Amino acid sequence: MGDIDLGADLSEGIDGSDVAEGKPVAGCFDGKPVILVRHGGKICALAGECTHHGAPLSDGIVIDGELRCPWHHARFSIDSGEAVGAPAFAPLDLFDIVEEDGKVRVTGKRKAVDCHQGPDRNPGHVVIIGGGAAGHACAEMLARSSVIATVLDADPAAPYDRTACSKAYLNGEGDRGDTALPNLAGMRAHAVVDRIDPAARVVVLTDGEEVGYDTLVIATGAEPVMPDFDGADGDNVFLIRTIDDAEIIVSAADKADRAIVVGASFIGLEAAAALTQRGLGVTVVGADDVPLADVTGPEVGAFVRSLHKDKGVEFRLGTKVTAFDGRHATLDDGSSVAGAFLVVGTGVTPRTDLADAAKLRLAAKDVGGGIAVDGGFRTSDERIYAIGDVASVPDARLGRAIRVEHWVVAQRHGQWLARSLTGAIDGDYGDTPFFWTNQFDASLAYVGHADGIEDRTIDGSIKDGNFAVRFADDALLTCNRDKQSLRREVQLDHKRSSLPGSAFTPSQV
């Protein structure tokens, strides 16, 4: 990803004709990156680094009054600098400019713009079950309209960026403090919900406390699946979902020289890369012959495998673990693999127990399961909504409901619902799904959603790590093609906006 090009010193000015409509221009002010953007004929100056992970916004694109980040597709208002789309929350600094004699010059930082205002609609007391990606983002966006939601989260560490658990925190590039998300006034960590009483409109905690609601949002997410093998309950067998999980694995890694990762999934391979970067020898055991082949295609799966093998990761593919004695894993082909501990990354299942007990309609398991919702995230109870990994959401592009298990998708669910509840937007949800994964030095970005890999077209060189794979339904997987990924996201967003409103209801999902 590299360092940001500071470009020209904008305090000295540049030719105004060099700032074309909708094309960010890199520069610097007081030694820090600043970009100039001509928007509607007016030139605006904003901080040049994304507030999420510091991406160079001069490499982003401008669309519909927003600046989109090239790395993780965060969105910022050009006029106000506000972070209007996850995964960024902090706004961009704005700068004053003067235009004289055909030159544009930055003169200093502008006073922050207050984008907060009261809601157009009052959702009453909003209670959110779950403080992960979806629940946190919903509450944070509600707070911008002065609506303080009560967030009940069983995780004692919430809120934090869960993507770091298998990436930056696990590989040692960041510490625990770096994972923190903006704190929330209504957040209640370590609050475990026992049941929902829709008739009384209360949520009952395990300690007997009752929390009343006018609007309830279920954002319970998903939980990792533990495969069935002898020794799965051992002290050195770890799932990876929470920051506490990651901390336990880090502690185990500090005392070990080899580890076993079960599952060649995205999260399993991220964990393998992270542990390798920590200096451990790692063996990945996976049931598929080629990792990720069912999602990315065998060509990209082989590319990812080669990235790992070049760093020393070993693979035992087409096999499953049948037993682990704390030092060796026995595989179903009769062989064994040595490792001081075992990390499991074999998928997740939606947490629907509360919804099921409350008699909310669930989606069928053969279409991904989860809680069935309509295009506005409303469940079969008009006072209850569901968002994030647990929600089966209508997609007008595909003509059916899908359940997507990705961090940014969950955050955007939450932000959209908050805007809908407060009257800032109407209609149905339609953001294009997006996720990214880091595999050592390669970052893969996927926009859209495809059910299979059979109909795919490859452009570029997979071997050289510069490619795009187009799937059915216009889904796109890219490596080192940030702008192409952004443009496809915009195309799919606009395709959705041109479609009639969703005809789905929870009873039809």
Image: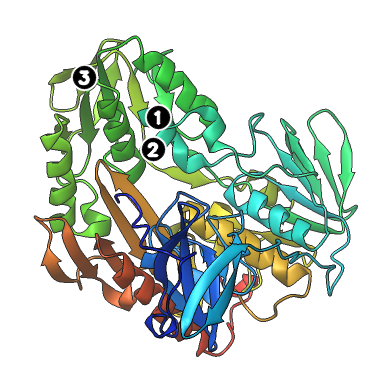
In the displayed structure, would residue 389 be above or below residue 259? below
Which numbered mark, 2 or 3, is in the foreground of this view?
2
Per the model, the C-alpha gap separating discs 3 and 1 is 26 Å
| Residue 4 lies in quadrant | bottom left
Sequence-first tag of 3 and 1: 1
Q: Which residue is mark 1?
A: 170
Quarter in which the C terminus is drawn: bottom right
Residue 298 in the image: state x and y as whole percent: 15, 56
Residue 318 in the image: state x and y as whole percent: 16, 39
Residue shown at 85%/67% (left/top)? 118
Residue shown at 79%/69% (left/top)? 422
Q: Which residue is mark 2?
A: 167
For the residue marked with disc 3, what is the amino acid?
Thr
**Which sits in the foreground, 78 or 379?**
78
Per the model, the C-alpha gap separating discs 2 and 1 is 6 Å
Task: Answer whether residue 229 is visible to the viewer in this image.
Answer: no
Residue 248 in the image: state x and y as whole percent: 47, 19
**Which sits in the foreground, 98 or 34?**
98
Answer left or right for 71 relative to 415: left
In the displayed structure, would residue 455 be above or below residue 158? below
Tag 2 near tag 1, CB within 8 Å: yes
